Each structure stands twice: as structure tokens, then as C-alpha cells.
Image (cartoon, rainbow, N blue to C red):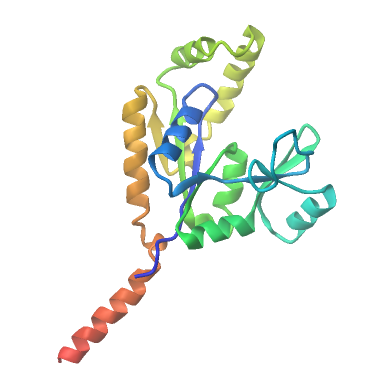
Amino acid sequence: MSIRRGLLIILSSPSGAGKSTLSKRLLAWDPDIRFSVSATTRAPRAGEVHGREYYFHSREDFDDLVARDQMLEHATVFGNSYGSPRGPVEQAIDGGTDLLFDIDWQGGQQIRTSALGKHVLSIFILPPSMIELERRLISRDQDSAEVIASRMAQSLDEISHWPEYDYVLVNEDLEATEEKLRTIICAERLRLSQQPGIVELVRGLNTEFGDRT
């Protein structure tokens, strides 16, 4: 039977809800899951390699990829463009590799409505409460009070998009949430659209039955 098709896993959450930690755990759990490498027009930083951290493109090349519908999603942030190139994503799908996307809800929406949308698995992570979300942001000890206040305000807009996702999980306990994520991914890999060999198998079963009559 043919290899399964890869999933495009979109994991979203407001800052502090646990997305980054859960993403790292998923990557450590299964080698068939890897981060999707984005394309960008910004210059490489010291130690960055084309195709590893990002696909680095000139403005002209990036705009050409967008014009030729070779970007599944794209956005401009602080004067630089970022996007998910279609070619590597299609190769991953055909090779049975699941890609994990680190994008916001707008990017996720673009991918869900793209030609590859049928391979998308979208999951939104909610905090158990806004008080707990703020506590987690403070406990990280990474941001000033002003930045934390800004993140809290932004989280309300992000949370408002939860109905657009296939699954919504409340991250009250990290271990339990990770287990639920694993269960969802295992089940979605068996989705009919992810199993190209099923049609061939059923055709063979029908032929085998016909040969017996």
C-alpha cells in the first residue's frame, strides 16, 4: 500500500498558553513531524543557513513566488515578508512527513483555504483562565509589565478565532494536553484523504472477489 500523505499541522494559541512547549514535545515525540521552514526577504543572520532556518529570497523573487501562487500564505512584518513556500510543503505531503506551522491565525486561515487545505489539521490551545495566562507570562520572566499587558490585550483577539479550528484543547495540564495532541494526530493520519493506497486496496478486493465467482 502507498505511503500515507503528510499532515499540515497548524497549532495556534495566545502567547503563554503553551504552544511553543507543546510544539517541541511533538517534534521530540515523532521524527515524522518537523517544522515547516518559512521563506523571508530579510537578510540571513550569523549562522543561519538557507533552507534550514529560512529560505532567504530577494524581494523580487519573493513577490514572483506570490504572483505564481507558490506561497501558501504570506505576510509582511516590520518591512520584511514571510511566507510558506508551496513546493517543500507538497514534497512533505507526498513523502508522508507532517509539517508543524508556527504561524498566526491569519496565516492558518490562508493555508486552510488553499489547494492543500484538505491536508490541514488545525488545533487551538486555550489557557484555563486569563488569570492563569497572565501568571504564565509573568513567570517566564522574559517581558516587561508593558509587554505583558500588550500580550494579554492581543490574546483576546487571538482567542476569538477558536471556532475556525478543527480541535480546541484547554491546556490546564501540560502532560494531559500533550497526550491529547498525540491522540488527535494519530487519528488524523488515518483520515481517508491521507491514505492514497485505500482506493487501490479496495479495487484489489473487488477484483479478488470477482475472481472467486
| In the image, farthest residue toward the right | 60
Could you tell me which residue is drawn at 64 percent across and 9 percent down? 144
In the image, taking residue 40 as reference, residue 124 lies left or right, namely left
Q: Is residue 159 above or below residue 71?
A: above
Quadrant showing the N terminus? bottom left
| In the image, farthest residue toward the front | 47
| In the image, farthest residue toward the left | 213
Q: Nearer the viewer, residue 68 or 186?
A: 186
In the image, taking residue 151 as reference, residue 190 lies left or right, namely left
Tell me where residue 8 appears, x and y as whole percent: 50, 50
Could you tell me which residue is drawn at 63 percent across and 44 percent down? 52
Quadrant showing the C terminus? bottom left
Tell me where residue 181 appears, x and y as whole percent: 37, 38
Q: Is residue 181 above or below residue 174?
A: below
Quadrant in the picture for residue 147: top right
Could you tell me which residue is drawn at 36 percent across and 57 percent down? 191
Tell me where residue 143 appears, x and y as whole percent: 62, 13
Q: Nearer the viewer, residue 197 or 17?
A: 197
Q: Nearer the viewer, residue 129 or 171?
A: 171
Q: Is residue 195 above or below residue 141?
A: below
Could you tell me which residue is drawn at 57 percent across and 43 percent down? 108
In the image, taking residue 213 as reference, residue 34 lies left or right, namely right
In the image, taking residue 37 as reference, residue 194 lies left or right, namely left
Tell me where residue 198 appears, x and y as whole percent: 33, 70
